[in-house]
Each structure stands twice: as structure tokens, then as C-alpha cells.
Image (cartoon, rainbow, N blue to C red):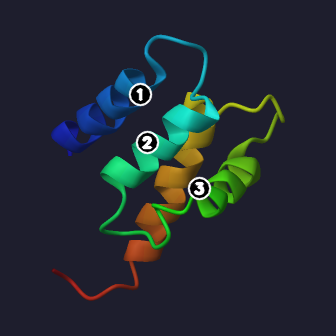
Amino acid sequence: MESAIKTMVTTYLGSSRGKDGLSSKSFQKLVSKNLGNIMEDTKSTSAVAEMQRGLDENNDGKVSFQEYLTLIGYLANSMINQPAV
């Protein structure tokens, strides 16, 4: 579990490049590069932009670490009902 947490944090930090949140472009890259096996439409710019708008609780146009964790929680929760791999 520790390695999974480290991976989530380093993935976010690497994508945000030390900035305060992920820009639209950075979020698009993170999603398409890292989540293609568990999400649909990760290559669709419009689908990822819509997802970003849904996560962006403070409407600043960026995905904060807390907003990113909301996505991770949603994905983890959706995997509970999936058959074990």
C-alpha cells in the first residue's frame, strides 16, 4: 500500500511540476498516460476537460491535490465492484 500512495503522490507532483495544481494540459497528460487501463475516453480532450470541470470544486481551472484525490477515490470505489484480476 505504501508504494501505491508514493506512486499517486509522485505522479501528481511530477505532473504539476511544483506548481499549485494541474493545468488543463497537465491533467490531460496525466489522465491519458496513467489511467487508460481503468478509464474510458482518456484520449478524448473534451471528455477529460469535462472530468476536470467536475473535479474543480473551487473553479480555479486547475486540479489541486485534494481534487486529484477525489478522482482517485472515485476510481478506487468503482473498482470494488469489478472482478478480481
For the residues labelled 2 and 3, the Cα–Cα distance comes to 10 Å
At label 1, which amino acid type do we have? Ser
- Which residue is labeled 2 in the image? 29
Which marked residue is nearer to the observer: mark 1 or mark 2?
2
Q: What residue is drawn where x is 67% and y is 52%?
A: 49
Residue 30, how many percent across, how many down?
42, 42
Circle 3 crowding by C-alpha within 10 Å: few under 14, some 14–19, many from 20: some
Q: Residue furthest top?
A: 18
How far is mark 1 from mark 3, CA to CA?
17 Å
Task: Examine the rendered structure and indicate whether residue 19 appears above or below residue 59.
Answer: above
Q: Secondary structure at mark 2?
A: helix
Q: Nearer the viewer, mark 1 or mark 3?
A: 3
Tell me the kind of residue under disc 2. Answer: Lys
Q: Which residue is at 71% across, 58% downward?
A: 50
Residue 44 screen position, x and y as percent: 54, 63
- Does residue 27 appear to the left or right of 39 in the view shown? right
- Separation of residues labelled 1 and 2 (CA atoms): 8 Å
Residue on which the image places disc 3:
45
Is 28 left, or right, of 55 in this rendering?
Answer: left
Marks 2/3 in contact by CB < 8 Å: the verdict is no
Q: Quadrant of residue 21?
A: top right
- Give me the residue at 40% from left, 22% from top: 13
SS at mark 1?
A: helix
Residue situated in front as seen by the camera: 43 or 31: 43
Q: Residues within 10 Å of mark 2 (few under 14, many from 20)?
A: some
Q: Which residue position is annotated with label 1? A: 15
Residue 73 appears at what percent x and percent y?
A: 50, 55
